[in-house]
Structure formats: structure tokens, C-alpha cells
Image: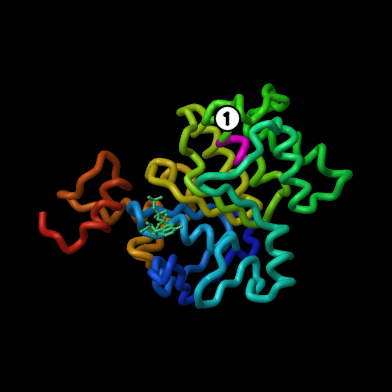
Amino acid sequence: MPRTPLGLEARNLVQGYHGRPVLDGLTLEAGGGVLGLLGPNGAGKTTLLKTLATTLPPRSGDLRILGRDISDRQALRAVRRRLGYLPQEFGYFPSFTVYDFVRYCAWLREVPTSDIHAAVTTAIERVRLTDVRHRKLKHLSGGMLQRCGIAQAIVADPDLIIFDEPTVGLDPQQRLEFRDLLRDIGQRAAVIFSTHLIEDIAAAADTVVVLTAGTVLYTGTPDELSQLAAPCSRGDTAIERGYMELLTRGLTC
Ligand SMILES: Nc1ncnc2c1ncn2[C@@H]1O[C@H](COP(=O)(O)OP(=O)(O)OP(=O)(O)O)[C@@H](O)[C@H]1O
């Protein structure tokens, strides 16, 4: 069992845009290890992750992250120092090099000056970008840029890491390496990642949460999700069939 720092507790979370609710009284608990978030397009995964990453304040409900109630401003600041986040689309300065960008993110997260070089070097190495560390971001491939985003999320050695579709743009080898990285990080931190790639969940998640229409439809292990598969379920693997069964439950074969 991974070492488990307090992850997060969300109760009756309501979130939305322009008065339209997206998260509808969502309740979710996550301890340590790796939690994989699945759900159809528009289910609210990105909205949930933005809320958990504290970039979108909840409309209502309670949110405790790393044991702290983030409605308290001091707690919010302390939590942000211990949180790493890869948004679905992350902003960056195209003329920064990989090293400078990750260094800047380390500085934003208040990594002590004397530790910054080692932290940046390690994060870049963990995503296999050492060879291109002095290349400008505007000259990176999409997959390299995504890995740079992963490096900035992990540079401050956070206790909670949130990745929104982290494997988009990675080639098959990089996806395998990223799964190793997820498992490794999950030994020391709480990790939450969203994906549409069920095989990433099967390979790297300790817990699966399925979101539909802004509420949690299912929480269990990847094996438990696989066991939901019925003979008529669609899908090429047991976990795909379990997931499809869950989404179509109630329909007859
Ligand atoms: N900034 C925004 N303004 C208005 N509506 C938004 C905004 N962001 C998301 N939405 C809407 O909120 C709903 C949930 O979107 P969200 O991106 O959270 O879903 P998702 O599960 O991450 O989807 P996907 O799998 O396609 O990435 C969708 O109906 C979307 O159109």
C-alpha cells in the first residue's frame, strides 16, 4: 500500500459556468496512491480537476485538500505550495527554454533558491527531456511540450498532483514511461489523473472514479470495474467491457 498523505475530501460540491451547473452536489474522497478519473465527454472531469486544483472556486460545498479547508485563505496558500497541476491546456512563454520554464514554475511554488537547480534537473530527467533542456518551448514537439508540463507539475515534489489528460500527445513508449512515473509518484503522493484511455487506468490507477453528468457514478479498483463486464458488454478488454457495462447499465442485451 502506498504511503498515504491526506488527499482530498469534497462534499456536495456544486460548480458551473454562467449559472449552468456542471458538478451537481458531487462528493468524493481520495486518499493516497493513484486515482484515475474516467467519464464521457462533458461529464465534468476538467471542471472537477480545476476545482480540486483550486483554480476555480466552488460555487458551494465543502472542499478539504491535504487536510485543510481551502475556504480559509491561509490554508489555500499553504495547499497550493504542496499541489502540482497539469491543466488540459497549460499556458507557457514560447521563448522560454525547458529548463527556464520548469525553473520558473519551481520559483512560483516557492522551492527554496538553493534547491531549485537540483529540483528542476530531477524533474526534467524524470520526463526524459534532459537532452532538450535548453531548447525553446516553441521548438518542442507536442509530446515533448506535454512532458514539460508534467515536469512543471512535479518539480516541487508535491503531496497532491493533478493531471488533466496527461498522456495526450505522448507516443507509446512515452505513455509506458509515464505510467511508471505515475506509479512511482503514487508511492509518495496522492495523484489524480483524468483520461479517456482506459488502458492507462488499468495499468497505473489504484482507484477508478467514473463521473457522469457531474456526479460520481462509480468508485472502485480497476479489477472491480473489470468484474462488472457482462457477456454482452462492448469492448476489447475486461476493463473496457466493465466500463461500457457501467455506462449502459439498464439497457438490455
Ligand atoms: N469555460 C466554460 N464556460 C462554459 N461552459 C463550460 C466551460 N468549460 C466547460 N464547460 C461546459 O461544462 C461541461 C463539462 O465540461 P468539462 O470540460 O468539465 O467536461 P470533461 O468531462 O472534462 O469533458 P472532455 O472529456 O470532453 O474533456 C460541458 O458541457 C462544457 O461545455
Which residue is label 1 attached to? 144
Looking at the picture, tell me which residue is in the foreground, 9 or 227: 9
Question: Can the viewer see residue 1 in this picture?
Answer: no
Q: Residue at x 75, y 38 (%)?
A: 120
Q: Amino acid at mark 1?
A: Met
Residue 118 locus on image (x, y percent)? 81, 38
Looking at the picture, tell me which residue is in the foreground, 207 or 135: 135
- The answer to whether residue 204 is left or right of residue 100 is left
Quarter of the figure that contains the N terminus: bottom right
Quarter of the figure that contains the C terminus: bottom left
Q: Is residue 246 magenta?
A: no
Looking at the picture, tell me which residue is in the foreground, 69 or 204: 69
Q: Residue at x 60, y 63 (%)?
A: 54
- The answer to whether residue 170 is left or right of residue 98 is left
Identify the element where label 1 is drawn.
helix
Question: Can the viewer see residue 252 in this picture?
Answer: yes
Q: How many discs appear?
A: 1
Residue 129 locus on image (x, y percent)? 65, 28
Q: From which residue to which does the magenta span run?
A: 146-150
The image's colour scheme reads: rainbow
